[in-house]
Amino acid sequence: ALQRLVHVKMLGETAELAGMQDTQEVIVPLLSSLMGDAESVIRQHLAAQLLTVCVVCMLKPPNNENDGKNSRGLLQAKDWIVHPEWPKDYDEKGYRIVTEIIVGQLLSKLISDVDVDVRRAAADALTGLSLQIRVEDIPHLILPIPLQLANDNAAPPPSNNPPGAQVKKTEAEQQAEEWRMTSANLLAELGGAVAEQAHVQTQVTDWATAHLVPAVLGFTTDSSFRVRRAAAQALPRILGACDVDTVTEKILPSFQTLSRDELYRVRKSTGECLVDMSRSLVILAQHQTERPNQKRLLEARRSILIPIADRLIQDEHKLVRQGMMQFL
C-alpha cells in the first residue's frame, strides 16, 4: 500500500513530464483500477491528483516557448490552476476524456465514497475543474453530480416522535446524511468558486439561480441538524453567483429562518457565518452596475444581518452567545 501511495502522489507530476498524448493514452487508462483500491488513502490522493491530470490532458501548451512551460517545454498545470481566467486552447480528444472518463466515471464515484477524506478531495477536484472546463458545460457536467447525490439520499419524512426526542439512526440513514452534507458543501464550493472569478460570473447566474440555489435551500429544511448547519455555511458562498432578487427574496430569508432554528448548533453556525454573509453582500453590491441594486443589497445587509446578530448575542444558549462574542 505504501508503494502504491507513493506512486499515486506522483501522478500529477508524471503527467506534466509525460505530456498530453502520453497522459491521454497511458496514464488515464490506469486510473480506474486505482479508484477501486481497498485503501481509502489511495483513493483520497488519487482524487487530489486528478485536477492536474485533467489540465495536462485537455489544455494545449501555449505557443510561446517561454510562456507557461517548464524546462522540458511542457505545460505547467499549476499555472492554469492558479490562473483559471487565462484563455484556454482545448484539445478536443483530451476534453472528451476529461468529461466522459475522469468526471463521468471517476470523480462522480469518488464524491460518494464512504470515506469523508476521499469525498473532500473529490469535491476539491470538481470545484477546481469547474474553472478549467468550458463555462457552458458546468450545468450538465459538474452540477448534476452534487444534485444527484442529494436526490439519491433524500431525507426521510418527518417522524411522529416528540420534539427533542433522541432517535437512534440506522447506519444507512447516517451515511445518507453524510452524503447530503457532502452535496451541500460541494454546491457551496462550486458557487463560491465561480463567484470569485469575474470572467465567468455573469455566465453562471442563470444556472445558479435555477439549480444550485433550490438545492441548497432544500437543505435548510432538512430533518438533520447537521445538514441544516451545512446549508447555513453554504448560503454565503453561493450568494455571489446569484442575482439580486434571489438574494433578497430567497437566500436572506432562509438565513433568517436558520438563525431561529430550534437546535442551538444551527443557530451558532449562522452566527459564525454572519461575517462571510456580510462580506458576500458587499462584494455582490460592488459588482452591480445599477445603483438601485447596490442600495438594495446594502440595505438588506443592514436590516437583516444586524437584527440576527443582536438576537444571537442574547441567545438563550451559552455556546451561541460565546460564539457570537468571538466574532464581534
Image (tube, rainbow, N blue to C red):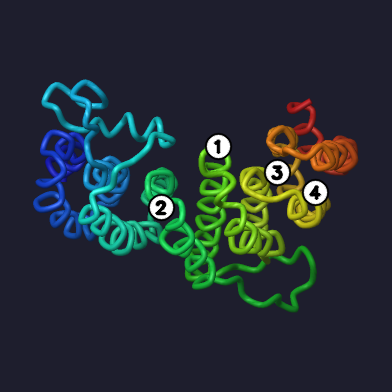
> Is residue 23 found left or right of 115 in the rendered image?
left
| Residue labelled with disc 4 | 259
Label 1 or label 3, whichever lies nearer to me, is 1
| Residue labelled with disc 3 | 269
Label 2 or label 1, whichever lies nearer to me, is 1
Mark 3: which secondary structure? Answer: helix
| Residue labelled with disc 1 | 198
Label 4 or label 1, whichever lies nearer to me, is 1
Q: Earlier in the sequence, mark 4 or mark 2?
A: 2
C-alpha distance separating marks 4 and 3:
8 Å
C-alpha distance separating marks 3 and 2:
22 Å
Q: Earlier in the sequence, mark 4 or mark 3?
A: 4
Whether the residues at callouts 4 and 3 have beta carbons within 8 Å, the answer is: no
Position in image of residue 255 (x %, y %): 77, 50
Position in image of residue 251 (x %, y %): 74, 53
Position in image of residue 190 (x %, y %): 51, 49
